[in-house]
């Protein structure tokens, strides 16, 4: 199917958008279809996200015309997250990597062939790469945990960092998964912006009859979009990104941009949000 291309949006455009406009520009759904590779190309730092559901078959990573390359990772690096409930296999240039739920595979630039198999649900995030780094698997137990928040403020959570400056090496891709404690519904609050990186969230493990209300926009001019399970939302460098769920959930966060410094953010006081 044709790749979904999302163009960059300036902050002064946001107040003019209707709910439909916001969803058309920032919300990405329908990434996961059995037997297919589906993609969305965001012009914000040229991030590409995708979904693959092998369904028991073998599904090769396709190369959309929009990336203008012989093979997908010719000039790109790739992060693969198993967001499903079963194990899956990712084969890179003949080498098999078994990914359990919440495991991540970093695929380096120059990898010519990537094939997905098993009953997993694979979420893909890719960024342009200027150098080659080794392909490496990082399990959930091997990821760097960071405990944040409190049950008293409904945002107790553990951030697991997989692809980052102190973990799996990359050119500009930074990726992790956040799991909320039982009874906590807020993520990334207090909110922040990071003007040197764009970010994309994928919400998963959310019951089909529940939703996440995701806040975005400049801190003084916020908007919201309502997201279902396995929907993603694009966050430009000028936008906050925080959400409140109606039930338990997890999310994959992924960034690309000028640096790999996870702490390079501008915190926004809660009382200053409008």
Image (spheres, helix red, strand yellow):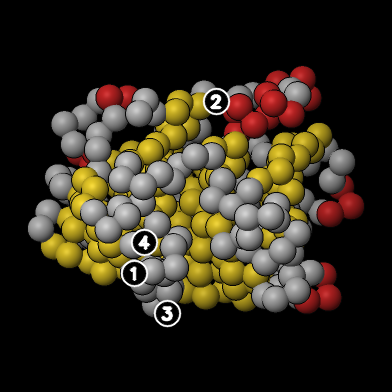
Q: Nearer the viewer, residue 247 or 140?
A: 247
Of labels 3 and 2, earlier in sequence is 2
Q: Is residue 94 above or below residue 156?
A: above
Marks 1 and 3, how far apart in space?
15 Å
Q: Nearer the viewer, residue 238 or 266?
A: 238
Q: Nearer the viewer, mark 4 or mark 3?
A: 4
Identity of the residue drawn at 44% across and 54% down? 174
Percent position (x, y) of residue 231?
A: 56, 46
Percent position (x, y) of residue 20?
A: 69, 26
Residue topped by disc 2: 8
Of labels 4 and 1, earlier in sequence is 1
Q: Secondary structure at mark 3?
A: loop
Residue topped by disc 3: 141
Residue topped by disc 4: 120
The label on residue 87 is 1
Percent position (x, y) of residue 247?
A: 72, 63
Of labels 4 and 3, earlier in sequence is 4
Q: Are marks 4 and 1 in contact (CB under 8 Å)?
A: yes
């Amino acid at each position: 199917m044709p790749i979904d291309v999302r163009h960059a949006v300036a902050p002064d455009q946001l107040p003019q958008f209707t709910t439909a406009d916001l969803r058309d520009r920032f919300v990405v759904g329908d990434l996961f279809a059995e037997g297919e590779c589906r993609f969305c190309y965001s012009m914000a730092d040229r991030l590409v996200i995708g979904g693959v559901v092998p369904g028991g078959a073998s599904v090769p990573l396709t190369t959309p015309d929009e990336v203008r390359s012989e093979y997908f990772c010719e000039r790109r690096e790739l992060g693969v997250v198993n967001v499903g409930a079963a194990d899956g296999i990712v084969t890179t240039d003949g080498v098999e990597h078994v990914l359990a739920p919440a495991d991540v595979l970093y695929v380096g630039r120059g990898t010519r062939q990537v094939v997905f198999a098993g009953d997993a649900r694979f979420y893909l995030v890719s960024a342009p790469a200027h150098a080659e780094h080794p392909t490496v698997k990082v399990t959930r137990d091997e990821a760097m945990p960071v405990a944040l928040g409190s049950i008293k403020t409904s945002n107790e959570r553990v951030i697991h960092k997989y692809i980052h400056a102190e973990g799996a090496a990359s050119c500009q891709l930074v990726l992790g998964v956040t799991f909320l404690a039982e009874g906590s519904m807020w993520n990334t609050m207090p909110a922040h912006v990071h003007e040197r990186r764009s970010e994309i969230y994928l919400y998963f493990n959310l019951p089909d009859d529940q939703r996440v209300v995701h806040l975005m926009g400049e801190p003084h001019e916020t908007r919201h979009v309502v997201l279902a399970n396995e929907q993603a939302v694009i966050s430009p460098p000028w936008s906050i990104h925080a959400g409140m769920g109606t039930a338990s959930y997890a999310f994959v966060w992924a960034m690309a941009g000028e640096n790999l410094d996870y702490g390079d953010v501008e915190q926004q006081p809660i009382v200053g949000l409008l």
